[in-house]
Amino acid sequence: MKVSIKRASGFVMYEVDLNDATLLEVLNSIKTEQDSSLAYSSGCRSSVCGSCSMRVNEKEVLACAYKVQDGDVIEPLKNVAVIRDLVVNMDKALETNKRAKTWLQTYNKEAKLTHEDEKTNALQSDCILCGSCYSACPVYSVNEEFLGPFALTGVWKYVSDKREAEPKEKIDTVQTNGVWDCTLCNECTLVCPQGISSKADIEKLRMKSTMAGYIDPSFAQNFGGGLSF
């Protein structure tokens, strides 16, 4: 079985004698038996840490979960700086969580969560920050300041949490380079290993934004800032 891996010098082809192997197993085999200089990231080997995210045939995957096929083309994530081979710097991507304030800011001590309340944002809580959605998002190619899929999903997690006493503050935070900049292309959802739909979360944030008095800037511009009846 042959695979091509993007390295600093270009694509390098490797041949491995493995069947039904994960990409991480293939990479480990190449590094230990053929090329010790190959660099990649891995951690839990159980699809929960997100550190081994990369692209195969132009689609984001977790190396520990993806089963390699003959002829696969392997590359690092997009929209992030490459440190070496398949290792990328996630600092800028993770910074979006800080800018979006994806945490419980003002605690509502009177809030009592039911089992149904816990289910409201249980899926969003499964985000492993692998960066797959960040890599797949086409908006970053034209707007590096975009908050992006996993940060906006994080915002929705707390906007929908009854324990957040001031959800409006979070809605205010995502108006610039946020909910209205998303094209709703759904690429983030298609590559999420946890099955999270950031597109759906962004749509819900748009609804909350409208309820808070905000409007899509492009809509406002096209109609002169308002409508008359």
Image: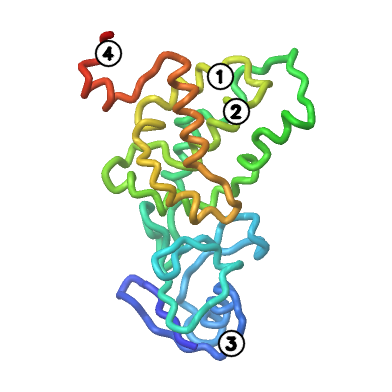
Give the answer, above or below, for where 6 lies relative to 61.
Answer: below
Cα–Cα span, label 1 and label 2: 7 Å
Residue 18 — which label? Answer: 3
- Residue located farthest toward the bottom when viewing the structure as drawn: 17
Query: What crowding class fits label 4: few (fewer than 14 Cα within 10 Å), some (14-19), or many (20 or more)?
Result: few
* Number of the front mark, 4 or 1: 4
Give the answer, above or below, for where 182 lies relative to 164.
Answer: below
Q: Earlier in the sequence, mark 2 or mark 3?
A: 3
Q: Position of residue 40 (x, y in %)?
A: 50, 67
Residue lying at 46% horizontally and 15% vertically, measured from the top left:
212
The answer to which image quadrant residue 215 occupies is top left
Q: Secondary structure at mark 1?
A: helix
Contact between marks 4 and 3 (CB within 8 A): the answer is no
Amino acid bearing label 1: Pro
Cα–Cα span, label 4 and label 2: 32 Å
Relative to 85, is 10 on the left or the right? left
* Number of the front mark, 4 or 3: 4
Judging by the rendered image, the residue that carries numbered circle 2 is 158
- Residue 70 versus residue 74: which sits nearer the camera? 70
Q: Position of residue 43 (x, y in %)?
A: 62, 61
Q: Position of residue 17 (x, y in %)?
A: 56, 91
Q: Earlier in the sequence, mark 4 or mark 2?
A: 2
Cα–Cα span, label 2 and label 3: 45 Å
Amino acid bearing label 3: Leu
Query: What crowding class fits label 1: few (fewer than 14 Cα within 10 Å), some (14-19), or many (20 or more)?
Result: many
Judging by the rendered image, the residue that carries numbered circle 1 is 167
Q: Secondary structure at mark 2?
A: helix
Contact between marks 1 and 2 (CB within 8 A): the answer is yes
Contact between marks 4 and 2 (CB within 8 A): the answer is no
Cα–Cα span, label 1 and label 3: 51 Å
Q: Position of residue 60 (x, y in %)?
A: 47, 61
